[in-house]
Amino acid sequence: MKYAVIDRGDSMSQQLAEQLHKLAAASELERNDDQPELVVSIGGDGTLLQAFHKYVHRIDEVAFVGIHTGHLGFYADWKANEMEELVRMMASEKPKIVSYPLAELEVQTDKETISYVALNEITLKGADITLVAQINVNDEPFEMFRGDGIVISTPSGSTAYNKSVGGAIVHPTIESLQIAEIASINNRVYRTLGSSFLLPQHHHCDIISKKDQRLLLAIDHLSVQSNDIRALRCTVSSKKVHFARYRPFPFWNRVRDAFIDL
Ligand code: NAP
């Protein structure tokens, strides 16, 4: 089994990473940073986002597992003091592979079309003032959006930014994208849906910039600022992210433990 480790960069996560490499060497696991089969993320959900984007080019060959050094995460379920058990299982057991949907984004600029894949969400905001954008669903006009921005989240990203803007939490077996508004303007002149909505697989949503405006685009934690973004096309990706489960990690328990059980 070839593995790699991505840590958050703080001293605790770095020490745990060193410890994991020692335990793994003793268990004859092969460290391979270029072509891992298993990527262990040590930190939080934000660290798993970094690990995902580092290995997104090998998304079909890689499974992720997360160790959290703070609070229990949505992507990171192992505690620091369980690392020996995790390494033992990595060396001796075949994990159950759980796959979650991803969001695919095509960005059309004046010069080119660029593709991205997001694990949590795609966020579009106006850099200066209000974002003005035409939203089309399956090539039909849907609404003219005016407001702070739009969040297009995956099911596993629905517990992140999407939840903060009032979107619903979606189980990752429901292959969909959720389109949620950030502070839309609704009055006698301007009208938007006013609630989030879900797009199933094979539907697409286009967000077309409707004036000369600087836009802030974020793909998970990665941001892009640009004067020449003309349109975005968002779909459920044909690719999925894979997680290695050495024990159950039920989604609704995570939701309860993160947001209700204090
Ligand atoms: P950050 O601003 O340092 O942290 C954002 C927080 O979101 C962290 O507590 C992180 O958990 C948590 N998080 C990440 N993915 C999650 C998920 N799928 N479900 C529930 N919580 C999740 O930024 P970051 O760590 O680089 O993460 C980038 C993410 O921040 C974006 O993808 C976006 O979802 C989120 N964000 C949220 C808001 C908001 O809620 N108003 C605004 C901007 C961005 P850990 O502490 O375990 O890392």
Image (cartoon, grey):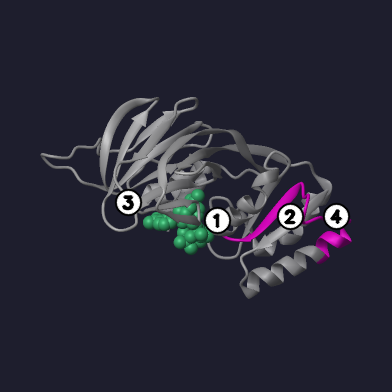
- The secondary element bearing badge 4 is classed as strand
Query: Looking at the image, which residue is at 35% across and 51% down?
Result: 125
* Residue at the spot of label 1: 45
Amino acid type shown at disc 1: Asp
On screen, residue 170 versus residue 71, left or right, reads left
- The question of residue 172 being in magenta is answered with no
User: Disc 1 beta carbon < 8 A from ligand 1?
Assistant: yes
Residue identifier under label 3: 213
Which one is earlier in the sequence, the residue at label 3 or at label 2? Answer: 2
* Left or right of 173 on screen, residue 65: right
Is residue 44 visible to us here?
Answer: yes
Question: Residue at coordinates 41% horizontally, 49% vertically from top-left?
Answer: 228
Q: Earlier in the sequence, mark 4 or mark 1?
A: 4
**Distance in Å between CA atoms under marks 3 and 1:** 32 Å
Q: Amino acid at mark 4?
A: Glu
Camera-side residue: 65 or 31? 31
Residue at the disc numbered 2:
86
Nearest-to-viewer mark from 3 and 2:
3
Which residue in the protein does label 4 denote?
30
Residue situated in front as seen by the camera: 132 or 55: 132
Which stretch is magenta?
22-45
Identified by mark 3, the residue type is: Gln
